[in-house]
Amino acid sequence: MYVGWAARRAATNAIRGPQSALTDFLASHNISAHQIHQEHQRRLREAQQQAAQETGEADENKENESDPGDEAVEERKKRKRKEEKAIMKIKQSKEFKRRKFEEKIKKRQKGSGDDDDSDYDDDSIARNMLYKKAQPMPGQFENCEICEKRFTVTAYSKTGPEGGLLCTKCSKELGKEEKKKQQPKKRGPLKGKRRQTESDRMMGDVKPGAKSLVEICVRKVVANIVDIEEFGDLPQTLLDRLSQVLSQKRALDPRTLEFFLQADSSRIAIYDAAKLETDDFEKIFSFMPELEDVNLRNAGQMKDEVLLYMLDHNPKIKHLQLGAANLITNHGWLQLFQKQGPKLESFKTCDLDAALDDSAIEALVQHCPNLQRLKLKKCWQTTERSIQCLTSLPSLHHLSLSICPDTSAETLSTLITTIGTPLETLSLESFHNADDTTLTAIHRTCTELSKLRFTNNAICTDAGFASLFSNWPNPPLPTIDLSDNRDIDNQNPDGPAERPIGLASMGFQALMTHSGSRLEKLNVKACRHISHEALLRVFDHEKHTYPMLRDMDLSFVAPVDEVVTTAIFRCCPKLEKLAIFGCNQVRGREVRIPAGVAVIGMMDAQESVVVEGGWERGDV
Amino acid sequence: MTVRSTTDSTPAAGIDSASSSTSPMTTPSPFVTLISSDGFEFHVRRSAACVSGTIRRMLNTRSNFSESVTGVCHLENLNAMVLEKVVEYLYYNEKHKESRDVPDMEIPSELCLELLMAAEYLDT
């Protein structure tokens, strides 16, 4: 709708004074008060002009009515003179100037660009204005330009494309069209693309070249999931990948669930069962009698009756992983352990705050003698008693606990000492009261570990960690996670200087000395007391290489800077992913990153990051 | 473009070449042949074909597979439409090996499931 290009430009350049609440309200609905005012004024002016002309012409006509005969020629002459007078008058009006400007713009857009017929155009514009019926005043009736409906003209009536007025319906639709035209401009094409590249980089996807065909097809399948009726006979690895991507896109619902229900399959993994109802869970178990491995996350709607059905219909289940199954009661858990317990080899569950209390864990221990893997994360109904009764599990090889943060150090030590010997995986997260005695227990008992996680503690000392890794008969570990082991004291953010808390310089060096040769995945996020010297000493490429290290997280370790990162690239030839969130001393512009390494979390991570193509990591 | 086929329908894709039979003494020819279940033969540059892990292992001269001697791979579980797309991908992958931010190759939706199974089988 045309207020007039010039008028709009003037409006935006002008200084804005305070505006009334009404104007603000109208502006929020894309109605410009200024625009309406101008329209109104324009119509008033035109109406006045028209009235003046009509009266003028009427007078002149009266005078000339007396001579009919040779009036023909004279009349024509007079009419012409009148016309020219009127046109002259109009040309002086503001409205004419506005319309002329519009015509110019239109012409420029069309691309004709000739100025020769400008006079001719002026005349035609003026003539249009003269003979066209002036727009009626507010309060009068008018036919809508687009739909021909009769409506009352108000100050808010919009002008149509041809200059006529529109009824309320058509003006609304015109408004919508305008909005649509304006909106696509908001998002530049580069913005979406940058987000996608950052997301891919986080997934470690920085290798040059095209994605694998499997990956391209998985994405295509998920994009067209609406049209697909069944998957056919896909191997389990592909089904797993499809389940992951579908869950990520939140497209896993009762309809797409059917694709995964293969009657002879022994495994099912649904990574986000949030959209599934209780009946859908039952369907899984009834369609797949051969199930041995069940992994259902976000299984919010799974109830006791489903568990009981499963216990009757799926006798082969050995591995069970349930996430957030909060509708299952303690009674349900008890039934599960009593009936299926002897066959269970792994049991993993997380995010339970309604049930699974100490009595349930006791039942677990009592009825599951063959349990090899146990993972209990964020099961809020459990207390220290649960941890104490875990000492009775005879054949655990993998233990992950992230419950009862207030457990005493003594209980933990007892647990480790009792069942720690055969453990290959030990994960103790957020045990706030654990201390150096816990670390000593690990050092003394565990000799088979390949994965160690001990996080979020503010009591264990650097000396304790150093002792853990020094002269430890356990072979070098491929996976170590010691994140968030640091002092928490707002008065003293650097921690005590004399006896550092958490994983600091000595502990870090001992760690790398012990496990550096086999280390593949290392996480020391937020161990901020590790010193700059220690980092340089560890990543000194003349003395050490870490041939298998591919994934490292040094986020929030403040001393990390470009010198450290360069040193890291030199001594870690297989490095694929390095996370440095919160490392403020690393500036994007100066870091040189070898090809194939995903560095995530860097400040100023934009196109200015220089990724070296041919730079080999062995080069000095 | 040379595609020899026993049936009389489209697609025509194969890449042109002179495929010579290899004797064990000479160096292996730069082109190999991939044959679909319905008899279409695709002559493909060896380097592109080896983008697929499965084909690479089949053609490995150190193995004793007949394919490594003859340079011909019969892919009985892929039909010609799927194999054509696979060959297109092999060349696409080889061409963009060194570039960054490579856009995904276009795949028609009707083929995507079969192509997925083929890609999994071919380890590509």
Image: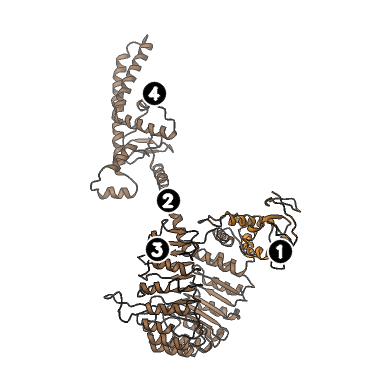
Tell me, yes or no, whether dots 4 and 3 are on the same chain.
yes
Label 1 CA crowd tier, 10 Å (few <14, some 14–19, many 20+): many
Graded by Cα atoms within 10 Å as few (under 14), some (14 to 19) or many (20 or more), the crowding at tag 2 reads few
| Number of residues whose C-alpha sits closer than 10 Å to that of mark 4, classed few (under 14), some (14–19) or many (20 or more) | few
Chain in orange (letter) = B
Mark 2 or 3: the one toward you = 3
Residue that mark 1 sits on:
B68
What chain does badge 2 belong to? Answer: A
In-image side of A616 versus A260 (left or right)? left
Measure how far apart labels 2 and 3 are at the Cα level.
Answer: 24 Å
Q: Give the CA distance from mark 3 to mark 1.
A: 48 Å
**Label 4 to label 3, Cα distance in Å?**
64 Å
Decide if residue A503 is in sight here. no
Q: CA distance from mark 4 to mark 2?
A: 42 Å
User: Does the CB distance between marks 3 and 1 fall below 8 Å?
Assistant: no
Label drawn at residue A602? 3
Q: Label 3 is placed on what type of residue?
A: Met
Q: Could you tell me if the residues under marks 2 and 1 are in contact, i.e. CB atoms within 8 Å?
A: no
Q: Which one of the lettered chains is coloured brown?
A: A
